[in-house]
Amino acid sequence: MPNEFNEVIFETKFWIVELGYKQAYLGRSVIILKREVLHLSDLTEKEALDFFRVIRRLEMSCTKGFGATMFNSMCLMNGNYKQEIPKKFMHWHFVPRYKTSIKFHEVNCEDLEFGTKFNWEKVFGSELEKINQTKDFSPEFRQKIIKQIKRYLA
């Protein structure tokens, strides 16, 4: 179930990690379970343990590679219930947060809401263009982000 860019960062036995298609928060990724489940409680113990290993690897990589200060991880599943029969698509949003602005390959990245809740509008709304210079988020730039994440994966 890859995103429209099919930008897989890495895989484990149970999870696929893809670069989020909007990079309002540098390094934002989506962690997707390889099988269909509807509820968090449907995860096996092995899947749950592997998930925490994935999180550990992403946190370490984004800390070393981008200077992330902290992380938000969420499994909302709200969109799955917009259909009469809910879509069994277990995925987590992994969002690095930054106390100070950073420059990555000449692009300034700022987390203006650091210390507050994750801002979905920033990811999916018009604020993205104002905050992070999305004209520079070309496929080539996105590959640089992936390369940097992979560089520090443990």
Image (cartoon, rainbow, N blue to C red):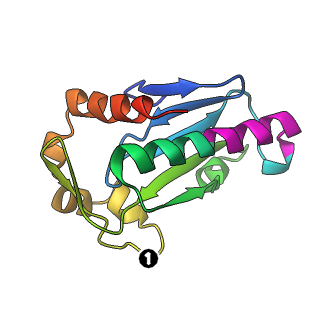
Q: What quarter of the picture does the N terminus occupy?
A: top right
Seen in the picture, residue 108 relative to 22 is either above or below; the reply is below
> From the viewer's perspective, is 66 left or right of 37?
left
Q: Amino acid at mark 1?
A: Gly
- Name the residue located 64 percent from the left edge and 52 percent from the top edge: 77
Please report the bounds of the magenta region as a residue range.
Answer: 42-54
- Name the residue located 73 percent from the left edge and 36 percent from the top edge: 50
The percent coordinates of residue 126 (x first, y second) are 24, 60
Question: Could you tell me which secondary element the residue under label 1 belongs to?
Answer: loop
Quarter residue 52 falls in: top right
Q: Which residue is mark 1?
A: 115
Quarter residue 56 falls in: top right
- Is residue 84 magenta-colored? no
In-front residue for pair 107/118: 107
In-front residue for pair 110/153: 153
Seen in the picture, residue 141 relative to 38 is either above or below; the reply is above
How many labels sit on residues?
1
> From the viewer's perspective, is 101 left or right of 29?
left
> From the viewer's perspective, is 117 left or right of 21?
right
Decide if residue 87 is in sight here: no
Seen in the picture, residue 40 relative to 69 is either above or below; the reply is above
Quarter residue 110 falls in: bottom left
Decide if residue 130 is in sight here: yes
Secondary structure character of the magenta stretch overall: helix
Seen in the picture, residue 58 relative to 18 is either above or below; the reply is below
The percent coordinates of residue 153 (x first, y second) are 50, 33
Mark 1 surroundings: few (<14), some (14-19) or many (≥20) residues within 10 A: few
- Name the residue located 46 percent from the left edge and 67 percent from the top edge: 118
In-front residue for pair 108/89: 108
- Name the residue located 53 percent from the left edge and 60 percent from the top edge: 72
Q: What quarter of the picture does the C terminus occupy?
A: top right
